[in-house]
């Protein structure tokens, strides 16, 4: 049913606009229903500057807030005596719309097809109303940096800088490894030559001894084939015994190391640590959820009451005071409390809002503390879990090596038994076939020498393979130097680009403001102000630094001498000019005009017609559409220069 009602509203508003603005088909058209103090109104926006003329409390601000809202800025308030409102902006054949509801005292969007999804750009640099954060910051003397730099995704840039920095550090470490690898190559190549020579010597020795064995066996016609086979088998068993013994020795040494590391690791891990941390994390998550619920419940109360206190033009008649005393003393004005219906002074509401706001800040700080604690405990839990997994892997490795040692010992015992049997068989065969004990002893020594040489050759061959593999690996690393250096140069360039990106935006903002501010001062004729300029100040160095924007004022006295002054000493109109120029500088520096070619200007009543004219000329240079609210007196003087629309023309405004 609600959507059907809105459909009728939009249809009627289109009909009214077409009827009232038949000669402005190509102009943007704004249609408003139940927004602020407006029941129903239409508004045609001319290219360039359009002035919205009307007395105070004539709903100029409501119309501008509606326009800012449909462009993508803060939501405008629903009319206090209505539960729903609508805003539509038609530009050529494209339509943008907002459908709004009042829920629990808060305005919410039930349908949103706004001009731009970049809400922060619209709020800061398009909607230059009285509540614009930049204008408010100038009046309050607050830091401009976080506002002017808010559209820049600092988190993304900082994250990218950190990622690039880590990659550059890794590449630097890689290049150091390549340097180390290159320095090791000469020694390894020399080691390879030595092993190759040793292997060749052993192979020559083996050939000589085998030839001698064959010659001795050929001289003895009584040596049987069985004896020869037994001797060869004995040599093979001896070689296998030596291999098993070396493997057992190596495994036992590694087993001792693993056992020692395991004992050290186990002593550092409390058994109940992970369970305790998990329980604490569950408790903190529940506590954080409770705090978030409290903050979400209190925030709409603050927004609702702040909205009522900020703009009396949007407060229903039933909620405003009628007494002359309250008109003379705004602080004593009374409102009907929207929660209980009782009458209270505005100061009381303000005090309560401040109390609730302080409570929300306290809860947010508490939630941030809990969030940091959750992050810390989560990291501790991860470290403990990783350590427990390492301990489990060490246990598995220890058990596996212990089993392997036992298996090899059993194999060694079997081989030693086989060797004893072979020695016995050889001795028996020798007695049966040979009557030359010295010749048999010499032959046995030759077989032993052959066995030792074969074992030594195998060891040298393994060492040679390892050295050659290491040389190949290091040569491959050295060959990758050029690619690594090229990547490092690219990463370093990207890192400089990201670091300079923020600085370029900062300097562009400062330079744009300083140029425009001087132009405005010259045009508006503030004779006692020599210069107003923004300074970029960078604090810290290296990887940790921060930047601020500081406003400076230079005045001139009657004698023409200049001196430094403060922003606080400026008049309200002078500070308002600064706020508008700062916002326009942000509009240009962030290329907002390419995204939202509108500027919505309100609260310039403190300027005379001549200064408003010069400000509009400045805005008109940089935005396709400028809509500004002015009083009738200024509108009359500027009517020949700019298209002007009176709030009296709003159809059905109440």
Image (spheres, grey):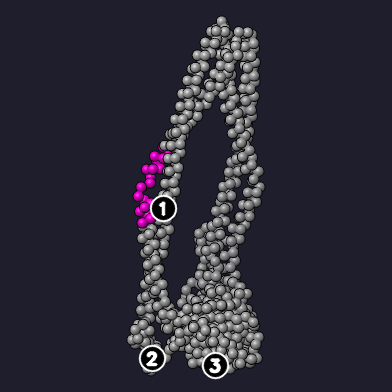
Q: In this view, does 189 lie above or below 214?
A: below
Residue 406 image position (x, y, % from top left): 44, 30
Q: Which of marks 2 and 1 is nearer the N terminus?
A: 2
Magenta segment boundaries in residue numbering:
260-279
Residue visible at 51% across and 68% down in the picture: 548
Residue visible at 61% across and 31% down in the picture: 464
Mainly helix, strand or loop, the magenta region? helix
Residue 55 image position (x, y, % from top left): 51, 92
- Residue wearing tag 3: 651
Residue 125 image position (x, y, % from top left): 55, 76
- Label 1 crowding class (10 Å Cα cut-off): few <14, some 14-19, many 20+? some
- Residue wearing tag 2: 321
Labels 3 & 2 near each other (Cβ < 8 A) = no
Labels 2 & 1 near each other (Cβ < 8 A) = no
Q: Residue 381 carries which label?
A: 1
Residue visible at 57% across and 71% down in the picture: 510
Distance Cα–Cα, label 2 vs label 1 = 60 Å
Distance Cα–Cα, label 3 vs label 2 = 28 Å
- Mark 3 vs mark 2, foreground winner is 3
- Label 3 crowding class (10 Å Cα cut-off): few <14, some 14-19, many 20+? some
Q: Is residue 397 above or below residue 199?
A: below
- Mark 2 vs mark 1, foreground winner is 1
Q: What element carries label 3?
A: loop
Residue visible at 37% across and 54% down in the picture: 277
Q: Is residue 268 magenta?
A: yes
Residue 556 image position (x, y, % from top left): 54, 79
Q: In this view, does 586 lie above or below 573?
A: above
Q: What element carries label 2?
A: loop
Q: Is residue 207 magenta?
A: no
| Residue 501 in view (yes/no) | yes
Q: What element carries label 1?
A: helix
**Considering depth in this image, is 490 or 402 the residue closer to the camera?**
402
């Amino acid at each position: 049913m609600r959507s059907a009602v809105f459909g009728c509203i939009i249809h009627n508003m289109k009909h009214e606009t077409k009827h009232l603005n038949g000669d402005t088909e190509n102009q943007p058209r704004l249609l408003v229903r139940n927004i602020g103090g407006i029941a129903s109104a239409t508004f045609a926006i001319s290219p360039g500057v359009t002035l919205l003329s009307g007395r105070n409390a004539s709903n100029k601000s409501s119309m501008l807030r509606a326009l800012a809202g449909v462009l993508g800025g803060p939501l405008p308030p629903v009319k206090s005596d209505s539960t729903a409102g609508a805003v539509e902006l038609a530009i050529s054949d494209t339509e943008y719309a907002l459908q709004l509801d009042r829920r629990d005292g808060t305005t919410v969007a039930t349908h949103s097809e706004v001009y731009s999804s970049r809400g922060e750009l619209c709020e800061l640099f398009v909607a230059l109303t009285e509540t614009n954060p930049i204008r408010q910051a100038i009046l309050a003397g607050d830091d401009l940096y976080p506002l002017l730099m808010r559209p820049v995704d600092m988190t993304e840039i900082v994250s990218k800088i950190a990622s690039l920095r880590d990659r550059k550090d890794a590449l630097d470490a890689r290049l150091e490894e390549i340097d180390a690898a290159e320095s090791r190559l000469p020694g390894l190549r020399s080691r390879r030559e030595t092993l190759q020579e040793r292997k060749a010597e052993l192979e020559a020795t083996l050939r000589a001894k085998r030839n001698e064995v064959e010659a001795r066996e050929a001289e003895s016609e009584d040596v049987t084939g069985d004896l020869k086979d037994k001797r060869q088998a004995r040599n093979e068993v001896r070689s296998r015994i030596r291999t098993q013994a070396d493997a057992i020795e190596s495994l036992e040494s590694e087993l001792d190391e693993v056992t020692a590391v395991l004992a050290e690791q186990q002593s550092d891990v409390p058994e109940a640590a992970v369970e305790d941390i998990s329980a604490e994390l569950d408790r903190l998550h529940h506590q954080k959820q409770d705090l978030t619920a409290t903050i979400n419940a209190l925030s709409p109360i603050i927004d609702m009451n702040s909205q009522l206190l900020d703009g009396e033009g949007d407060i229903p008649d039933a909620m405003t005071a009628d007494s002359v005393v309250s008109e003379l003393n705004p602080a004593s004005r009374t409102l009907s409390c929207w929660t209980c219906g009782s009458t209270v002074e505005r100061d009381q509401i303000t005090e309560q809002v401040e109390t609730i706001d302080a409570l929300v800040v306290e809860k947010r700080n508490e939630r941030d503390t809990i969030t940091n604690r959750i992050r810390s405990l989560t990291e501790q839990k991860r470290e403990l879990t990783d350590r427990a997994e390492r301990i489990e892997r060490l246990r598995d490795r220890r058990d596996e090596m212990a089993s392997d040692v036992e298996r090899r010992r059993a194999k060694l015992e079997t081989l030693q038994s086989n060797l004893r049997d072979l020695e016995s068989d050889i001795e028996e065969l020798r007695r049966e076939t040979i009557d030359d004990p010295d010749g048999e002893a010499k032959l046995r020594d030759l077989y032993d020498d052959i066995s030792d040489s074969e074992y030594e050759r195998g060891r040298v061959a393994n060492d040679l393979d390892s050295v050659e593999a290491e040389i190949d690996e290091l040569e491959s690393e050295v060959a990758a130097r050029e690619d690594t250096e090229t990547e490092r140069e690219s990463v370093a360039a990207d890192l400089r680009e990201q670091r300079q990106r923020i600085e370029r935006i900062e300097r562009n903002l400062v330079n744009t403001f300083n140029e425009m501010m001087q132009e405005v001062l010259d045009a508006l004729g503030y004779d006692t102000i020599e210069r107003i300029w923004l300074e970029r100040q960078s604090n810290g160095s290296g990887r940790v630094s921060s930047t601020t924007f500081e406003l400076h004022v230079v005045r001139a006295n009657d004698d023409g001498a200049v001196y430094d002054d403060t922003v606080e000493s400026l008049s309200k109109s002078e500070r308002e000019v600064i706020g508008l120029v700062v916002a326009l500088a942000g509009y240009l520096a962030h290329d907002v005009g390419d995204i939202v070619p509108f500027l919505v200007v309100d609260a310039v009543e403190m300027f005379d017609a001549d200064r408003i004219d010069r400000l509009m000329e400045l805005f008109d240079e940089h935005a396709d559409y400028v809509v500004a609210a002015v009083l009738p007196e200024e509108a009359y003087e500027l009517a020949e220069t700019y298209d002007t629309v009176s709030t009296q023309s709003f159809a059905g405004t109440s």
